[in-house]
Image (cartoon, rainbow, N blue to C red):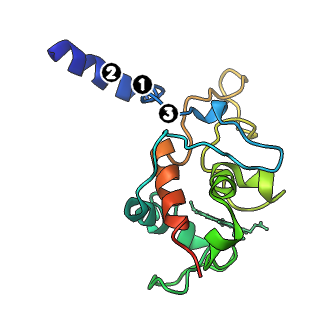
Amino acid sequence: MKLTTLTFAAAMVAGTAMAEGVVAPQDVVMSEYGEVATSLTGKPGDPERGFEVYSKRSLGNCVACHEISTLDVAWPGNVGPMLDGAADRWSEAELRGIVVNSKKTFEGTVMPAYYRVDGFIRPGNAYTGKAADDSFGPLLTAEQVEDVIAFLSTLKE
Ligand code: HEC
């Protein structure tokens, strides 16, 4: 029992271990049009936690660029479109694709790709002159992506 706990803790520290059933960023299957059809965790997200991801600066910080008229958020941003009725305009698979990697749906957008770890230009390691290692993770976890999708799915007019 003790050993199991330790092994689990070590896996958490390594940061690369994926919970069972979770799709790693490099394994996400995206359609030609930028849709991601299947849940990254294999289960539905939680819209309340998704609101946290949406509104917290340390998480998705979507409010920095987006506004939702029914939400009372101080100083929402307006770089991105209002998200009122987003679930009427986009299917769940499209919304997931936009959050995972918005660049596929909106070429050249300033919106961050929240579940992606490759395809970026990254500063090299100044000492060795080699590319920096890619050991840091995506901006959001798979679970946080699913939670924010569940939240976006409530935005119907
Ligand atoms: C740096 C600004 C920025 C941040 C942060 C940002 N977005 Fe966006 N988002 C945009 C822009 C700009 C667009 C419009 C696409 C384009 O033309 O570039 C957009 C488009 C969208 C769309 C499609 C909107 C529609 O109604 O058609 C959705 C949905 C969306 N974003 C969700 C999110 C979510 C969820 C987050 C947080 C996890 C987020 N965005 C964070 C800038 C941002």
Q: What element carries label 1?
A: helix
Q: Counting other residues with Cα less than 10 Å from the Cα at mark 3, is it few (<14), some (14-19), or many (20 or more)?
A: some
Ligand 1's quadrant: bottom right
Residue denoted by label 3 = 22
Label placed on residue 14: 1
Q: How far apart are marks 1 and 2 (CA)?
A: 6 Å
Name the amino acid, label 3: Val
Say which residue appears at 45% left-offset and 25% top-offset.
17
Name the one closer to the observer, 68 or 118.
68
Mark 1, residues whose alpha carbon is within 10 Å: few (<14), some, or many (≥20)? few
Spot occupied by residue 95 in the image (x, y as percentages of width and height): 65, 58
- Asked whether mark 3 lies closer than 8 Å to ligand 1, one says no
- Compute the Cα span from label 1 to label 3: 16 Å
Residue 83 vertical placement versus 124 (above, below): below
- Kindly tell me whether mark 1's CB lies below 8 Å from ligand 1: no
Q: Which residue lies furthest to the left in this view?
A: 2
Secondary structure at numbered mark 3: loop
Q: Label 2 sits on what residue type? A: Ala
Q: Is residue 5 left or right of residue 99?
A: left
Question: In x, y percent, where is residue 104?
Answer: 79, 51
Say whether marks 1 and 2 touch (CB < 8 Å).
yes
Q: Name the residue under label 2.
A: 10
| Earlier residue among tags 1 and 3 | 1
Contact (Cβ within 8 Å) of mark 3 with mark 2: no
Report the amino acid beneath label 1: Ala
Provide residue 72's location: percent of width, then percent of height. 44, 85
Q: Residue at x 46, y 44 (%)?
A: 43
